[in-house]
Amino acid sequence: MQQRREFLRAFGALSAAVAAPSFAGSSAGEAFDAAVADKPWLRAFKGVSDATQDLRCEALTLTGDWPAALRGRFYRNGPALFERGGQRYHHWFDGDGMVQQFSFNGTSVRHVGRLVRTAKLRAEQQAGRFLYSAFGTAIRSDAPAQGPDTFNTANTNAIEHAGRVLAMWEGGSAYALDPKDLATQGPVTWQDGLQQLPFSAHPKVDAGGQLWNIGTSGQRLIAWHIDPQGRLVDAQLGESPYPGGMVHDMAATTQYLVIPLPPVKLDFGRIAAGGTPEQAYAFDSREPLRILVLRKDDITQRRVFELPAQMVFHVGNAFERADGCIALSFVGASDHRSLVQSAVALVAGRPGPQRVSSTQLAVLDLASGRASVESLGDAVEFPRIDPRRIGLPARYLLNAAQWKPQPAGRGSLFHGITLRDLQTGREDRFDYGEQTVVEEHILVPKPGRADELDAWVLGTSFDAKRQLTQVSVFDARRIADGPLAQATLPYALPLGFHGNFTPAAS
Ligand SMILES: [Fe+2]
C-alpha cells in the first residue's frame, strides 16, 4: 500500500505539471482546411467536429465476395476530436478517442463510431473549449486536475475482453464501453484502491484469454494480470530502469513480460510551459535501447538487456526459445522524428518526414545477458501476428508498409500491407495505390482452423480520392491477389491507431 501511495504521488506531480496554466497558441480548422486543399490524403486528420454526433451506417456497400464465416466485431480506436472553441491540437496523440465497431453477420457489415465519453470529454463539452493540456498541446486553463484520468483521452486501442470493450490510453485507466452500442460505462477500476493507475494501450491476451499489461509513470511501473472473466489476478508494482521514458508496447511470453524502453525522455512540464514536442521530448542516442524482461509471477526478478539506441513504439511478438533465449520482434527507428515531427505535421495538414522504421529481430540470451538485433531494412509499422500465437513462436508478421517512392507530401503514410514469412524472409504484399492511406491490418483466424495462414487479413484504409473509409478482407495465403471483399462507408473516419477482432459466439 505504501508503494501504491508513492505511485499515486508520482502521478499527482505529473498531473500538476501538465495542468500548469500556459498557452502555446492555436491553429483553427480553417488553417487546416487550407493546408490540405491540395493533399486529399491528409484530410482524414481533420477529425470529427461535433462531439455529440455518433456515426452509424446499418449496411456498408459490399463489393467482392465477403466471407460468410467472418462473423464478429472489429474494433478500432484513434484520436478523433482535435478542435474546440477555435483551438486545434498540435499533436496526433492529443485528439479525444473514438471507437469504431464494424459488425459482420456473414452477409452484411454495420458500423457504429462513438467518441468515448471520458470525464475530460464531458467537462470540455460542457465548457465549450479545451480545459486540459494534452500530450503535445498546452491549454491555458485553471480547471483542476484530479489525477491521470483528468487528461485521459482513451484514444489508442480497443479490445473486447470479458464482455466489455476496453478503450485504452497510455497514462490512465482503460474506459469500458458496452459492446451492444458503444455506450461509455466509465473508467475501469480493477480493484478498490487501484483507481487511476495507468493501464497501457497494448495489453496482450494469450490463447487462454489471460490478459497481461503494464503501466508506467516516471520511475514507477505496474504489471497487470486480468483473468478471462475480467477479474484482477494481480497488480505488481515495481520500478523502471529508465525513469521518465516512454513505454508504449510490450510482449508477454509464457513466463516473461518483455518491455522495450527507448531512450526517449518525456518532459510534460515543458509542454505545459508552452514548449513544442520537439523541445519537450528528447531522444538520447548515447543511451541504449533497453529491453526490460520481468518474470510474470514476480516482477522483482528482472533482467535489462541493452541494444543500440532506437526509437520503438510497437512490438510484434516475443517467445521463449528452446535454447534459453527470448526471440523478440519489434519495429524500430533511428530516432524519434515520428513522435516529434510527423505526429505534429499530420494534424497541421503537413506530411512530415519520410518513414524510416523497420522490422527488428532481437535475441535476448537469458544465460549470458547478451542481446543482438538484426534490422530487416523495410519501411513498416503496426506489426501484428496470429492472435493465438501471442507469446509463442509465430512464423508470420503482418505490417502496414511502404515500398514505393511516395508522391510529394505523403511522407509518413502507408500505401500497402505486407505479410512476412520470418522463416524464409519472403513477403506477400498488396499495394492499395497512391490514392489510399493504409491503416493497421490484423490477422483473424478462420473458425476451426489451426494453421497461421488459415486466416483473413482485415484492415481499414482511407480512399483519399473518394474521401471514404473502407474495410478490406484478404485471404492470408494470397495477399498479393488483393482483397476478397471490401465494405465501404458513406463517410470518412478519422485515421486511427489500433484495433482487434472478436469472433461472434458460435
Ligand atoms: Fe500503439
Image (spheres, rainbow, N blue to C red):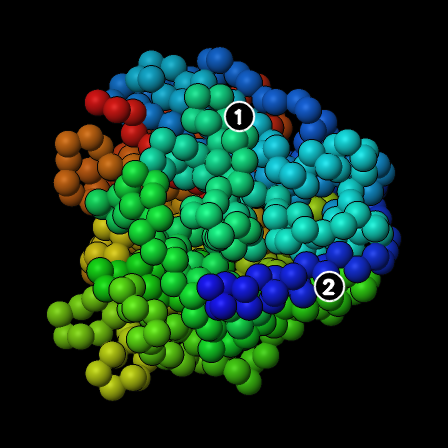
> Which quarter of the rendered picture does the C terminus lie within?
top left
Say whether residue 373 is left or right of residue 29.
left
Q: How many marks overall?
A: 2
Q: Of the residues shown, which amino acid type is indicated by label 2?
A: Ala
Residue 105 x %, y % = 33, 17
Residue 140 x %, y % = 84, 52
Residue pictured at 54% horizontal, 30% vertical: 184
Residue 424 x %, y % = 21, 60
Q: Which mark is residue 430?
A: none
Along the viewing direction, whichever of 368 and 205 lies nearer the viewer: 205
Say whether residue 83 is left or right of residue 47.
right
Residue with the mark numbered 1: 183
Residue with the mark numbered 2: 17
Say whether residue 323 is left or right of residue 301.
left
Residue 503 visible in rendering: yes
Q: Is mark 2 within 8 Å of ligand 1?
A: no
Above or below, comparing residue 30 to residue 303 in the picture: above
Residue pictured at 38% horizontal, 27% vertical: 73
Residue 312 visible in rendering: no
For marks 2 and 1 on the same chain, the one whose residue lies earlier in the sequence: 2
In three-dimensional space, the C-alpha distance between marks 2 and 1, rounded to whole angstroms, equals 32 Å
Q: Residues within 10 Å of mark 1 (few under 14, many from 20)?
A: some
Q: Residues within 10 Å of mark 2 (few under 14, many from 20)?
A: some
Q: Secondary structure at mark 2?
A: helix
